[in-house]
Image (cartoon, grey):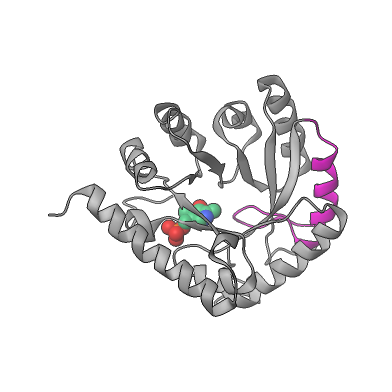
């Protein structure tokens, strides 16, 4: 059996090749796309190995798992991304380790994050999660605001102390008109991102693409891909 370090190194190399090939195919520079490794359900020891292998961005989706893991890894030169649905009673914990929150989808969360960030003396980059399959004015089943709610929410973030509007995030929808069409979904996200940048020029991050569809995201113009299972292996439990 190969050891864990070798396994992670091999997987990382394969993902790196995929990103490079997708960038080349799209006529983009490799530096335009940042790899975020989603370490949810995997132990702090894996995070440490990934950092040794050169990973600089990691993501988690549950505060209960992320908080102790981030504490164990606080000596590592990592940027921590929070990508899961976020309850307001968790924000005081999340602001202690997260540098970027990808899952902003309602005003109440903005207010809670702002209060917590100010109290902790931190500045957070905030991405608005877009539910491309949500009806106007609604939110998605797995979080996210409908496309027509993005600009208002960005205004809330821009006006909130301790928070910066940094861009958009989406997960390719499993239902609705974009089901099974990740490229079309990511193209739509890019249109919304262009509108957002017109109002907030610094909000230029576009977080899209996972293990199964990172090529589509890079082709569409994503700046950040969030890759879990292709690096760490298929997750043992739901997450
Ligand atoms: C788990 C997760 C990912 C990574 O998914 P993989 O298919 O394992 O690459 C990306 N984004 C979010 C929001 C996630 O929850």
Query: Looking at the image, which is closer to me, 115 or 202?
Result: 202
Q: Residue at x 60, y 71 (%)?
A: 28
Residue 12 x, y percent position in the rendering: 36, 58
Considering every residue shown, the one lying at the far top of the view is 119
Task: Report whether 201 appears left or right of 174.
Answer: right
Residue occupying the point 23% across, 48% down? 4
Q: In which quarter of the image is residue 16?
A: bottom left
Is 158 colored magenta in this rendering?
A: yes
Q: In this view, does 38 lie to the left or right of 150?
A: left
The answer to whether one can see residue 181 in this image is no
In the picture shown, does residue 108 fall above or below 127?
above
Give left or right: position of 239 versus 220: left
Quadrant assignment, res 26: bottom right
Residue 93 x/y as whole percent? 57, 27
Residue 169 vs residue 176, the one in the foreground? 169
Residue 188: image location, x then y, percent: 71, 71
**Residue 99 seen from this side:** yes
User: Is 105 positioned to the left or the right of 80 in the image?
Assistant: right
Task: Please provide the residue range marked out in magenta.
Answer: 137-161
Is residue 155 within the magenta segment? yes
Image quarter for residue 217?
Answer: bottom right
Q: Position of residue 236 (x, y in %)?
A: 31, 51
């Amino acid at each position: 059996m190969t050891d864990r370090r070798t396994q992670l190194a091999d997987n990382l190399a394969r993902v790196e090749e995929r990103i490079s090939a997708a960038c080349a195919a799209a006529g983009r520079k490799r530096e335009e796309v940042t790899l975020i490794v989603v370490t949810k359900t995997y132990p702090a020891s894996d995070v440490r190995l990934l950092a040794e292998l050169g990973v600089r961005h990691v993501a988690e989706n549950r505060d209960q798992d992320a908080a102790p893991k981030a504490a164990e890894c606080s000596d590592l030169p990592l940027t921590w991304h929070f990508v899961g649905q976020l309850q307001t009673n968790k924000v005081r914990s999340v602001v202690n380790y997260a540098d970027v929150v990808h899952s902003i989808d309602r005003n109440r969360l903005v207010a809670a994050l702002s209060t917590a960030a100010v109290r902790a003396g931190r500045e957070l980059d905030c991405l608005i999660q877009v539910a491309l399959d949500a009806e106007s004015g609604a939110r998605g089943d797995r979080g996210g605001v409908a496309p027509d709610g993005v600009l208002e929410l960005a205004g809330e973030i821009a006006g909130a102390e301790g928070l910066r509007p940094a861009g958009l995030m989406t997960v390719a929808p499993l239902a609705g008109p974009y089901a099974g069409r990740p490229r079309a979904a990511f193209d739509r996200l890019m249109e919304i991102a262009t509108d957002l940048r017109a109002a907030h020029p610094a909000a230029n991050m576009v977080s899209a693409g996972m293990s199964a569809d990172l090529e589509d995201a890079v082709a569409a113009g994503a700046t950040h891909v969030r890759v879990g299972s292709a690096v760490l292996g298929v997750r043992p439990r739901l997450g």
